[in-house]
Amino acid sequence: MHLYKTRKGNMLAYDLGHYVIGMDWDTLINRDDLHRYILGSLGAMKKISKDDFDLATTKDVSAPIGTQEVWAAGVTYLRSRNARMEEAQDTGGADCYQKVYEAERPELFFKSVAHRVAADREEVYIRNDSSWNVPEPELTLYINSKGTIQAYTIGNDMSSRSIEGENPLYLPQAKVYERSAALGPCLYIPPKPISLETMIHLEIHRGDKMMFKDSTPVSRMKRSLTELAAYLFRECDFPVGCFLMTGTCLVPPNDFTLQKKDRVEIRIEGIGTLTNTVSGKP
Ligand code: DO4
Ligand code: MG
């Protein structure tokens, strides 16, 4: 089932029809056993016609986030380790990526508060002081306050490779700025954990031209999703749960940088497509 957050309320797109769920977003998504809870509540929900919530045309969808924090894991795929080592080789920072890829403790970093997050079909930004920018398409977990992965969404961990490559200590500036994160288009709430064979697809378009296209299965990740969630919850409480981007495996070639007006499309099987146009802070 797919749960959308809209200005009209919380909309459920489910095999048997569309429903409005009249409950505060944070309270709803933090319910125990979310898939079963929603199924058990269908009878009490207002059913609406598909025309009242047309997923193809609606401009009303917000990012599927309430007041949760957004965290991110890094260097969870070999492709990401190699790309970071290349960008940092001239400045001497390359070693730390090799070490963290092999270490028991994963790299976890704070990515965003909710107000900086772009929704599907909204703009994401590249920094005005950065010369090398990429999107990072990442399977993103919604983990409830008890530390259980309950749902999934698509994340774009927009990143400045020039700032990150200059010095690993600049990571927060490379990663955290206005509209540097996108989440959406919905929360995917399956009855059981998603398959690791799930494919992540990335396309970058410039006008009519396809600038980059690639795909990867989640199974290429070196770590497990539950391991990442467990590390994040070791010493942090999240009263209404949190989002965790799980790292990128798709990195455009080193001579590519995003430009304003590029369109980034990330599709993850079973979840949907997250589309954002690139812009910058005015
Ligand atoms: O270590 C830098 C960030 C890594 C990252 O964001 C990723 O691998 O996706
Ligand atoms: Mg990333």
Image (cartoon, helix red, strand yellow):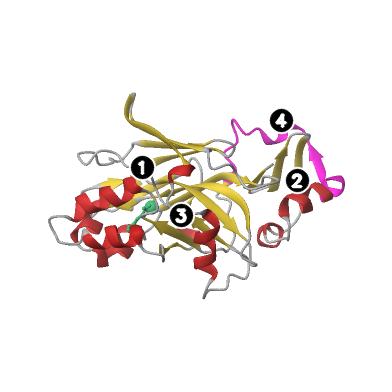
Q: What residue type is labelled 2?
A: Val
* Dot 4 crowding, Cα within 10 Å, few <14, some 14–19, many 20+: few
* Dot 2 crowding, Cα within 10 Å, few <14, some 14–19, many 20+: many
Q: What residue type is labelled 4?
A: Asp
In the drawing, what numbered circle is on residue 278? Answer: 1
Residue beneath label 2, please? 20
Mark closer to the chain start, 1 or 4 = 4
Mark 3 near ligand 1 (CB under 8 Å)? no
Contact between labelled residues 4 and 1, with CB atoms less than 8 Å apart: no
Spatial CA distance of label 3 from label 4 is 42 Å
Q: Is residue 210 above or below residue 191?
A: above
> Residue reaching furthest left?
90
Which region of the structure is painted magenta?
Answer: 41-61
Residue beneath label 4, please? 51
**What residue is rendered at 34% in x and 23% in y?**
208
Residue beneath label 3, please? 223
